[in-house]
Amino acid sequence: MDDTVIVGVDGSPSSLAAVDVAAREAQMRGARLRLVHAFSRHADLDPMIHGVLAQAEERAHHLAPGLEITRTVAAGETLTVLRAESRHAVLTVVGGRGRTGFGGLLLGSTVGQLAAHGHGPLMVVRGREDPRGPLLLAVDGSPAGKAAVAFAFAEAALRGAPLVAMHVWNTWSETTPYEGPADPLNVVVDLDRLEERHRRLLEEAVAPERAAHPGVAVELRLERARVRHALLEATRESQLVVTGTRGHGGFTGMLLGSVSQALLYHADCPVTVVRPEPGSS
């Protein structure tokens, strides 16, 4: 990856909000910003090139004076264009609503496909305006989630913000920590042992990055609740939520887990989905 933040632009208010966020992200990283638009081969390009993209560039320069900005206008399907562009980006940013093309990302499955099959972290700008609060990290304890943990700590250090590392558990998804007869109708759940196991999972998941970032203030939050509901509630008090693509014990073919999808569609703050490093599982 090079030192470029890319942002999908379609002229909708949501995509322009994404431009604002992407400009600030690029400025924080000392990176360049590239405005990307996908179009059908029969589209009239002049209004887009000289209108919407010019407006987007002006906004970005106003928010981040001195930022190096380039434009890319490519013929093709939205997902294909963004996937190709994301190969050379430290971060890809898209809006949560809009017109056609990039604006349709959250109206269908395109954003999920991009999160699962794109390259590098994907930030979806959604939720309340100007969100404040700590960063929120959704911890699942899976090997694939290590990249999300590393990204969240680095992002907290970059922003000078505290980090809430949150792990939510419940008995519905448990398959092994039961005590009692083999009869499934007569089992006893050792809740204390379960809670302790999940506490260790949370502590162990963040321990390496916590040691590597001693300046980041970290709150470990363990909750017994419905996973998606608890995380969505926590986004109401967060400036950004970071999640992996597939949770612990997820189906191999499900490259984007249900929790990640729920955050992408319903979080009350921007969401960054971080793909696992090659070779993790």
Image (cartoon, helix red, strand yellow):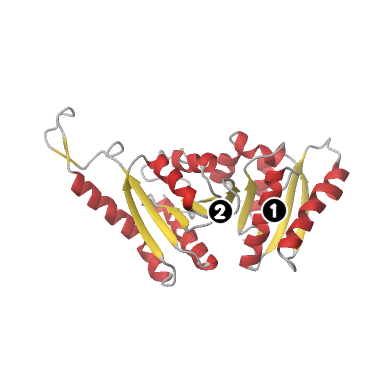
Residue in the image at 49% along x and 52% along y = 241
Q: Earlier in the sequence, mark 2 or mark 1?
A: 1
Q: Among all residues in the image, which is located at the extreme left? A: 181
| Relative to 105, 190 lies left or right | left
CB atoms of marks 2 and 1 within 8 Å? no
221 shown above or below 263: below
Nearer to me, 60 or 258: 60
Residue ID for mark 1: 19
Callout 1: SS = helix
Residue 237: % across, % down:
47, 52
160 shown above or below 227: below
Q: Nearer the viewer, mark 2 or mark 1?
A: 2
Residue 103: % across, % down:
68, 40
Amino acid residing under circle 1: Val
Q: Which mark is residue 131?
A: 2
Residue in the image at 56% along x and 53% along y = 131
